[in-house]
């Protein structure tokens, strides 16, 4: 076998191992926790009055925020979380 063929085999095996690593599936519970942390850690949203539900990667946000900016930012933050397939933003803008 030529050195070129050996190199190709080594590369293919290495690539196969790299892509075959078992990654833990992303659960609704882990998404829920990530959403809560992300919302609570944001200076604009503050996350306090927001209820979060997650079903099969679909995140529903409920509750009240004081400004439309908070409502929009909460949705943007949640959409960036790995495992979130969509966001149902049911937040209401008004005085708490």
Image (cartoon, rainbow, N blue to C red):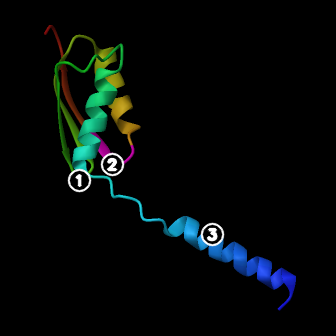
Give the residue drawn at x 34%, y 14%: 44
- Per the rendered image, the range of residues in magenta is 82-87
Mark nearer the viewer, 2 or 3: 3
Secondary element at tag 3: helix
| Among the 4 quarters of the image, the one containing residue 41 | top left
Q: Residues within 10 Å of mark 3 (few under 14, many from 20)?
A: few
Q: Which mark is residue 85?
A: 2
Q: Which mark is residue 56?
A: 1
| Residue 41 horizontal side relative to residue 61, left or right | right
- Nearest the viewer among 19 and 56 is 19
Q: Is residue 15 above or below residue 75?
A: below
- Nearest the viewer among 78 and 69 is 78
Residue 24, position as x, y percentages in the image:
35, 58
Residue 24 falls within the magenta-colored stretch: no
Label 2, label 1: how many angstroms apart (C-alpha)?
8 Å
- Nearest the viewer among 26 and 80 is 26
| Residue 41 horizontal side relative to residue 52, left or right | right
The residue indicated by pointer 3 is 15
């Amino acid at each position: 076998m030529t050195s070129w063929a050996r190199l190709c085999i080594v590369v293919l095996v290495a690539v196969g191992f790299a892509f075959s690593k078992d990654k833990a599936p992303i659960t609704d519970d882990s998404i829920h926790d990530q959403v809560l942390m992300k919302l609570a850690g944001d200076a604009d949203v503050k996350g306090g009055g927001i209820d979060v539900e997650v079903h099969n990667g679909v995140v529903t946000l409920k509750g009240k925020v004081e400004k439309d900016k908070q409502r929009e930012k909460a949705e943007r933050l949640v959409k960036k979380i790995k495992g979130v397939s969509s966001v149902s933003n049911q937040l209401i803008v008004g005085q708490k």
